[in-house]
Amino acid sequence: MLPPSEGSIDIFLQPGELYFGDRHTRIRTLLGSCVSITLWNPWLKIGGMCHFMLPTRGHVGPHLDGRYGDEALALLLREIRASRSRPGDYEVKLFGGGNMFPEHCSRHDKLSVPKRNVESARRMLKAHGLVIHAEHVGGSGHRQLIFDVGNGHVWLRHRALGHEQERDNA
């Protein structure tokens, strides 16, 4: 991973935040059970990333809230519309949903927050006609992501139960 070029901005997302930017943007986050979706337009060199904590809050309040997957995706789609581009022109990548306490959950626990986050993200993306081009989800531990909007690459470091895995261009 190259250092950011001069004039570029580096954004760090906390849980519940999202950012949409241009080719001069790198977006970072750290995920445990949360999920991030990246959307990148290879022609316009624009894109965004969200960091959501739960699939849904069950009802939409007066304002969309990025802590919930369905609302975070709605906010990203709003940014796409504002950029006068089409959602189908974006490459989609999905990350996260790591079990942070595997010793307390069975593998098939349907109430598992990480598992529900990943499954709901896949359903929401499919419902909007968005195709996932790459993903690194599930398992245990946390992930560090860096999304370079200029080239669409996502750098990933995954720390799972005693070992670390690093990948470029997920």
Image: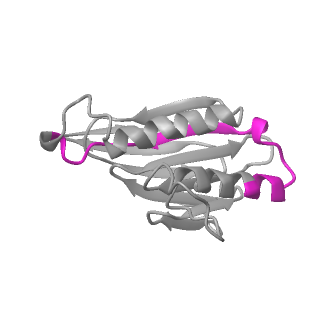
Along the line of sight, the residue nearer the viewer: 109 or 18: 109
Which region of the structure is painted magenta?
A: 78-102
Residue 81 painted magenta:
yes
Relative placement, left or right, of 86 versus 91 is: right
Along the line of sight, the residue nearer the viewer: 110 or 95: 110
Q: Residue at x 53, y 40 (%)?
A: 121
Residue 74 painted magenta:
no
Residue 52 percent across, percent down from the top left? 48, 55
Residue 2 visible in this rendered orientation of the protein: no
Q: Residue at x 74, y 58 (%)?
A: 79
Along the line of sight, the residue nearer the viewer: 63 or 40: 63
Across the whole image, how many numbered discs are drawn on residues? 0
Relative placement, left or right, of 69 versus 20 is: left
Q: Residue at x 57, y 42 (%)?
A: 153
Q: Residue at x 84, y 47 (%)?
A: 85
Instruction: Find residue 66 and report its image quarter.
Output: bottom right
Instruction: Find residue 39 and report its image quarter.
Output: top right
